[in-house]
Image (cartoon, rainbow, N blue to C red):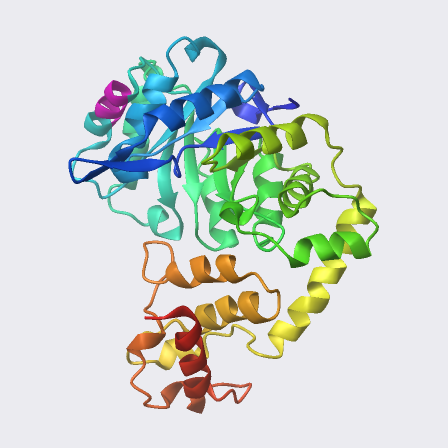
């Protein structure tokens, strides 16, 4: 396993991290629970292979992920760095929830405690200073070692959060298909933050086209996952690629890549970027993402996001990735509603600079993705 200095956090982090959001689940007495007979050996296998960073959160696996991670840590705590997250808006206060989470994990101190999914809104939050003060106090008392944040907002907001000056690390989306945070990651790294990226292989869904692109560029890769991980690890501003793994085979493949495969050269990365941009031009002819339609839609249908999902489906051939992208609409991370909410009023088409026949296109999207 390769390791990287993790900025202000002050430890070396494995290039591959274990994301405990997709642990195998099963049903017991009519309730969904984590299948610990599968999950714990899988987590232990990642530790055996050199992974020293595991990330969970309050909501993961129906609120059970932290408990399973805590059980998996038995006998490993001194060799593994543990991260979880505080969701602002939870009914419990910062300190109260932190103590509950420490109890679920059955540990005395967290290595990284993230403000979960904060963005521009956090800067203007009426309780921002209170949250920051509580985080600093918890760190001073030894309950957490590093104050961190996870991020799903526009890249410009990340720089403003970094400037607050209290954060040791950041967790954000970055992969071969979604490179929006590249400059923001470089800025965070320049300010001394450790950088972890989520979705390096698109939740396991990046397949098809990326491998074909590699072949055109003369890059040898055994799988799309290998190409995707090597692409992420080639970025000098990425310390750790956090992968949500649900099978031991995934753990072993990803650990092998993080241990043995050379990162892509700058020339190879440039070649892949150029090829992806050519495909993006095909997609841009379909929709430029200006969002004038959303601004004027009385139903708040997130048309550009829907069309982006359709581009992944039609132009890139990434069908499962596209479905996940579409289904994210209406979550806390993606505003608006899906295509089935369209009332065919035509306001969107009146304001579309590309003169796209949006109503008909939405019907096509709905046929592909469903309600």
Front position in the image: 359 or 86: 359
Q: Position of residue 51 (x, y in %)?
A: 54, 22
Query: Residue 56's quadrant in the figure?
Result: top left
Q: Is residue 101 magenta?
A: yes
- The quadrant in which residue 259 appears is top right
Near-viewer residue (22 or 351): 22
Camera-side residue of 28 and 20:
28
User: In this picture, is 209 found above or below 170?
Assistant: below
Q: Is residue 186 visible?
A: yes
Specify the quadrant that holds the N terminus: top right
Residue extent of the magenta highlight: 98-104
Does residue 155 appear to the left or right of 71 in the view shown? right
Q: Is residue 317 left or right of residue 23?
A: right
Residue 159 falls left or right of residue 109:
right
Q: Main secondary structure of the magenta part?
A: helix
Q: Percent position (x, y) of residue 63?
A: 25, 35
């Amino acid at each position: 396993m390769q390791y990287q200095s993790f900025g202000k956090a002050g430890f070396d982090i494995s290039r591959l991290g274990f994301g405990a959001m997709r642990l195998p689940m099963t049903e017991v007495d009519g309730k969904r629970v984590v299948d610990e007979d599968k999950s714990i050996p899988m987590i232990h296998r990642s530790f055996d292979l050199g992974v020293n960073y595991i990330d969970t959160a309050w909501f993961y696996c129906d609120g059970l992920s932290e408990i399973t991670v805590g059980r998996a840590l038995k006998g490993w705590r001194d060799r593994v760095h543990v991260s979880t997250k505080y969701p602002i808006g939870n009914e419990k206060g910062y300190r109260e929830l932190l103590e509950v989470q420490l109890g679920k994990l059955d540990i005395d101190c967290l290595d990284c405690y993230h403000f979960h999914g904060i963005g521009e809104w956090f800067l203007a939050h009426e309780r921002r200073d209170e949250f920051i003060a509580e985080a600093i106090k918890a760190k001073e008392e030894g309950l957490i070692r590093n104050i961190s944040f996870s991020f799903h907002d526009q890249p410009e907001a990340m720089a403003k959060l970094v400037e607050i000056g209290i954060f040791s690390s950041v967790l954000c989306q970055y992969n071969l298909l979604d490179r929006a945070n590249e400059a923001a990651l470089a800025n965070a790294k320049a300010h001394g933050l450790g950088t972890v990226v989520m979705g390096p292989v698109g939740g396991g869904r990046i397949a098809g086209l990326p491998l074909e692109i590699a072949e055109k560029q003369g890059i040898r890769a055994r799988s799309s996952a290998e190409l995707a991980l090597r692409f992420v690890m080639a970025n000098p501003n990425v310390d750790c690629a956090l992968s949500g793994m649900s099978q031991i085979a995934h753990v072993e493949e990803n650990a092998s890549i993080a241990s043995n495969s050379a990162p892509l050269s700058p020339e190879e990365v440039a070649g892949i970027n150029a090829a992806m941009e050519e495909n993006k031009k095909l997609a841009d002819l379909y929709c430029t993402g200006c969002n004038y339609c959303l601004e004027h839609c009385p139903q708040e249908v997130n048309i550009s996001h829907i069309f982006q999902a359709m581009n992944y489906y039609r132009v890139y051939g990434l069908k499962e990735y596209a479905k996940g992208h579409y289904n994210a609409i209406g979550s806390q991370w993606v505003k608006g509603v899906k295509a089935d909410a369209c009332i065919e009023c035509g306001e969107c088409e009146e304001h579309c600079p590309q003169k796209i026949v949006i109503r008909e296109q939405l019907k096509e999207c709905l046929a592909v993705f469903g309600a």
